Amino acid sequence: MKRIVFAGIAIGFSILVTMQACKPDPNLDVVADAPLGFTIPEGWPKPFYNFENNAVTEPGFELGRKLFYDPRLSRTNEVSCGSCHQPSAAFAQLDHPISHGVEDKLGTRNSPSIFNMNWHTSFFWDGGVNHLESQPINPIQNPVEMDETLDNIIAKLKADANYPKMFKAAFGDETINSQRIFKAFAQFMGMMVSSNAKYDKYKRGEAGANLTPEEQSGYTVFKNNCATCHIEPLFTDFSFRNNGIAITSVNDSGRAHITLDAADMYKFKVPSLRNLRYTWPYMHDGRYNNLDDVMNHYTKGITQSATLDPALKNGVQLTDKERSDLLAFLNTLNDEEFVRDPRFQEVN
Amino acid sequence: MKNILPLLLLVVVIGACKKKPDPITPEVPVTKNTNGELRISISHVAGNQALQVGKGWYKTENGDSLQIDKLLYFLSNFKLVKADGSMYIEPESYYLVQHKNDTDFTIVIEDVPPGQYSKLVFLLGVDSARNTSGAQTGALDPNSGMFWDWNTGYIMARLEGKSPQSTNHGSVIYHLGGYKGFYSVLREISLDAAMKIEVGKPVNMHIKADALEWFKTPNKIDIAKTSVMMSAGANAAKLADNCTDMFKIDHID
């Protein structure tokens, strides 16, 4: 009898314990129930990164967004990722040929735009970084960018009133470590897909989305002269090429810095041609302020060198009409909806 | 019998709402009570003396004087191999070995099925998969400073110190990294070791790791010519070949 009573109490107790231990945490429920949809736009290839081991959730994405705009991730508490990657510039740094970091220290390269990152097979102009989750550590530690250590950032985040709760909502408990920070960043940046330009709507056959005769003819000019490297629909093939821009005193070796192969000297990752209206200045060092300068480069400014891409040996020959049509076509690649998307803006 | 039933229930019920396993560190079944354990303690030496970082001066094979300030390296993918070739592979097997004066570094390989083993095999460095699969944690957390952020990948081994022969302001800096093809510095190390693993009787293996081996064979290092090495390439791969003979089993008890 006694034993049965004891067993009864014990079972009751264990049920109680279970209920306590399994009490649904409101935040955890969000994790389980509301994965944010990442959809591959119609007709696009499979992404290189598809959130393996890092399913996107609302709280994970929101944490990534907060981190992205938080200047406390820099030593001086003044520079955030968003300082160099601004939404209105399609996440490039507006009007800055080269990046400006802590205490206005200058980098040597132009801050690239950030969108469609999940299709990138490598990161940075020289492709030195091999994974979206491994990317943020570089700007954080870079002395001319944010100049901060991971351990300091973790200490700052732990002392904050909100972050521990946000980490719990995103990852199940309040532990803050570099892995979780990088996964949250990847969730935020990975969701930034730009696929609603006029060109995209035209390709999808949406009602009213027609190209004008100029844009249509510019599309043909593009296919004939630019598409070996700037391949649709992402407008890059993610390869490393020398497009014949002149070597400057900085003498940035580009891809060769990573591969130590002379054949890769002065090659840089082919950038996307989407959202050019917002991302100026252009090229890895921001040397051209407008698309006219870029056109002048391809038509009459090609510098011959050992690693110049064969496709550009003779430059690009364009009539005035072809040139203005090409510019009209490039203009159809601007995605105002993406640039204004409230999901990617800073929140306070 | 009856009175352990409630206890069992309690365990089962609590177990039922255990946190979901971390997707990248798969849970291994807990079978400690039926398996044995290998404890590996690594003590660092410089030739025939105990390594004293920041204190001792040593002579390299080339006759250069050297003081070592830092010695760190990754060991991973431990395997215990039997004479018939069958083996126990430790899951999630990553260790960052950091030398501290007068202290051994201990690695405990748990859950080894009992039996007679003949070899210990491991990798010097972090396998290429973990260099290419994004954010890691634990021993692989990049906050250790053993990670290249400009050319993704772990610094597999790192030796820093001073030498009058150095042509870099008296300092010697070797960061061995690179996991790709020809320039990979990853080296599999296999040590003959007769070990009988039994339940409840941990086997203690004592390894001596000689820092001066970095400078010795097959590629004798002249510090005046090689004072700094901080990127992947043919030279790093040569230095990695030297590191391969760093580890000797002193005794097993």
Image (tube, coloured by chain):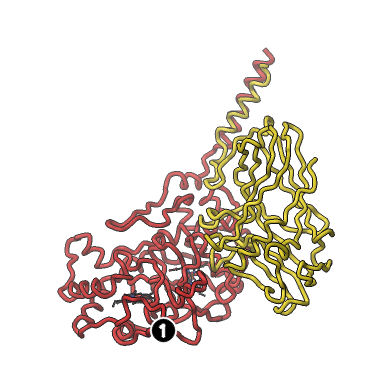
Residue depicted at x 64% and y 40%: B81
In the figure, B157 relative to B39: above or below? Answer: below
Q: Position of residue A93 (x, y in %)?
A: 44, 76
Q: What chain is colored red? A: A
Q: Quadrant of the N terminus of chain A?
A: top right
- Left or right of B119 in this view: A56: left
Q: Helix or strand or loop: what does disc 1 sit on?
A: loop
Name the amino acid, label 1: Arg
The chain letter for the residue carrying disc 1 is: A
Whether residue A155 appears in this view of the structure is no
Label 1 Cα crowd, 10 Å radius (few <14 / some 14-19 / many 20+): some
Q: Give the residue furthest to the front.
A: B218
Q: Nearer the viewer, residue A103 or B201?
A: B201
Give the total of numbered labels. Answer: 1
Rendering colour (chain B): yellow
- Left or right of A219 in this view: A291: right
Whether residue A334 appears in this view of the structure is yes
Q: Which residue is mark 1?
A: A287
Residue depicted at x 55% and y 32%: B16
Q: Position of residue A240 (x, y in %)?
A: 41, 71
In the figure, B210 relative to A126: above or below? Answer: above
Residue depicted at x 68% and y 76%: B225
Residue B149 picture quarter: bottom right
